[in-house]
Amino acid sequence: MQKRLSKRPRLVAAIVAAGVLGIGTYAFTATNTVPASYAGSGSGTISGYTVSSVQYVLATANPSNIDKVTFTLDASATVVKAKLLSSSSTYTDCTISGGTSVTCDFSPDVSVTSADQLSVVAHS
């Protein structure tokens, strides 16, 4: 009989210890705070820009090369890139003045005979 009684206090102590750990864990997690955040889904119309008043500026040192292209967009943009070769995957960064006046300075210059497509990528 004495063996049975000696196991009982250990069992009670184990249950009490588990309870204390459970309460401590709950108290720790109960103090966490999560800031408010947003999540959602939506859609909007994407329309393209109209490019007008395109002017090709030839290089001064070699007028058989295009140094710059200037053009106007029909709406304001914050980023514009352009390329003159359909086979190229590299776009040149352009500068924007007044949101709609764009200048693209190609370096290296593009040969007039190689230029086969003005491709413009823009976003606001």
Image: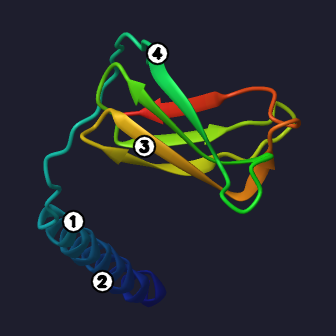
Q: Secondary structure at mark 2?
A: helix
Spatial distance from mark 4 to mark 1, Cα to Cα?
A: 51 Å
Task: Name the one closer to the observer, 65 or 103.
Answer: 65
* Quadrant (top left/top right/bottom left/bottom right) for the C terminus: top left
The quarter in which the N terminus is drawn is bottom left
Q: Which residue carries the number 2 mark? A: 13
Above-or-below relation of 52 to 5: above
Q: Earlier in the sequence, mark 2 or mark 3?
A: 2
The residue that label 1 is drawn on is: 29
Measured from the top left, where is residue 7 in percent x and y?
42, 83
> Which residue carries the number 4 mark?
48
Q: Earlier in the sequence, mark 3 or mark 1?
A: 1
Q: Earlier in the sequence, mark 4 or mark 3?
A: 4
Q: Answer with mark 1 or mark 2, whichever residue precedes in sequence.
A: 2
Q: Residues within 10 Å of mark 2 (few under 14, many from 20)?
A: few
Task: Classify 46 as above or below 58.
Answer: above
Which residue is at a point 17% across and 56% down the rendered structure image?
34
Amino acid carrying label 4: it is Gly
Q: Position of residue 96 (x, y in %)?
A: 36, 45
> Between residues 120 and 21, which one lies in front from this camera angle?
120
Rendering coords of residue 21 (x, y %): 27, 76
Q: Give how far apart the Cα atoms at labels 1 and 2 are.
A: 24 Å
Q: Estimate how packed mark 4 is, as few (under 14), some (14 to 19) or many (20 or more) residues with alpha carbons within 10 Å.
A: few
Q: Is residue 97 left or right of residue 3?
A: left
Residue type highlighted by circle 2: Ala
- Asked if residue 54 lies left or right of residue 60, the reply is left
Q: Amino acid at mark 3?
A: Val
The residue tagged 3 is 79
Front tag of 2 and 3: 3
Residue at point 29%, 30% (across, down): 76
Query: In whole angstroms, how far apart are the C-alphas of marks 4 and 3?
Result: 14 Å
